[in-house]
Amino acid sequence: MADSPLQTIFKTVTTTLSETVSVTDSTIHNIFHTIAVTLSDGLSAVDQLFAPPSVQVTFLTIEAHSPVNILITAPTGAQAGFGVGGASVDQLGANMTGPGTEPETVTIPEPSIGYYQILVAGTPSAAQSGSPYTITVESVGENGNNLSQWSETGTATPGSTGYLSVYLLSNGTVSTTLPVASTGNEFLYIILGLVLVGVVAVLLVNRRTVNMARAPKVV
């Protein structure tokens, strides 16, 4: 997988800095390269999620097939759909079919890129022993074409609640994970990388102070 623009820029700047500090000091050079790789792996998650949209996502449609109501919370915190008891909420200018319809649909125009949470609430018509449901999330492009689709199944009882989470990426993909070529600990890597930067900065300051103290004084 090729480096993202953010990774490329970060690696270039860090490599240049490491070579500027000391071309011959392999230890310092290797430390800076380690920081570059560590941070770029973590930042790639943020880069791919919040990059400028590469396609125009016109609508995000969420469908519930079965006896459940759905309430969607967008990355902005605004909501649309039907919560527990079927109470209607629309802070997103959504097109909604209404509680209890089959399928129950919430279509959000010009959706924000980012993290969406879906509340799934069992309706009174669900069986006490549990009724199966399917939630489908689909992103639609400006020409009405299907960009991406994701679905999840589960079981609901009357009054039950559960949550599903998806990401709408800048390329229109709907996914439960961020597509990065790393171990999945991206944000831990960011924190670790920042700590390493701080440690190296302290070492460089101390090194310069020692060198200045050892320099011969001109009388």
Image (tube, grey):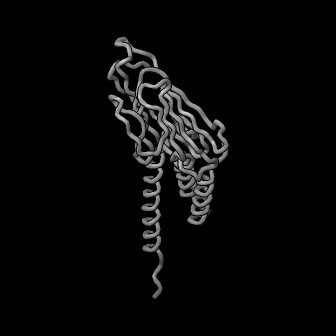
Between 98 and 219, the one lying in front of the other is 98
The residue lying at 33 percent from left, 30 percent from top is: 84
**Camera sees residue 177:** yes
Q: Residue furthest top?
A: 129
Residue 188 x/y as whole percent: 45, 44
The residue lying at 48 percent from left, 41 percent from top is: 94
Quick check: 8 above or below 164?
A: below
Between 102 and 184, the one lying in front of the other is 102
Location of residue 217 by image quarter:
bottom left
Q: Quadrant of the N terminus?
A: top right
Q: Quadrant of the C terminus?
A: bottom left
Between 18 and 12, the one lying in front of the other is 12
**Camera sees residue 41:** no
The residue lying at 45 percent from left, 45 percent from top is: 92
Quick check: 131 above or below 74?
A: above
The residue lying at 44 percent from left, 31 percent from top is: 98
Residue 168 x/y as whole percent: 53, 41
Between 4 and 147, the one lying in front of the other is 147
Residue 51 x/y as whole percent: 57, 51
Quick check: 163 above or below 91?
A: above
In the visual, does 73 lie left or right of 30? left
Q: Residue furthest bottom?
A: 219
Location of residue 11 by image quarter:
bottom right
Residue 56 x/y as whole percent: 62, 47
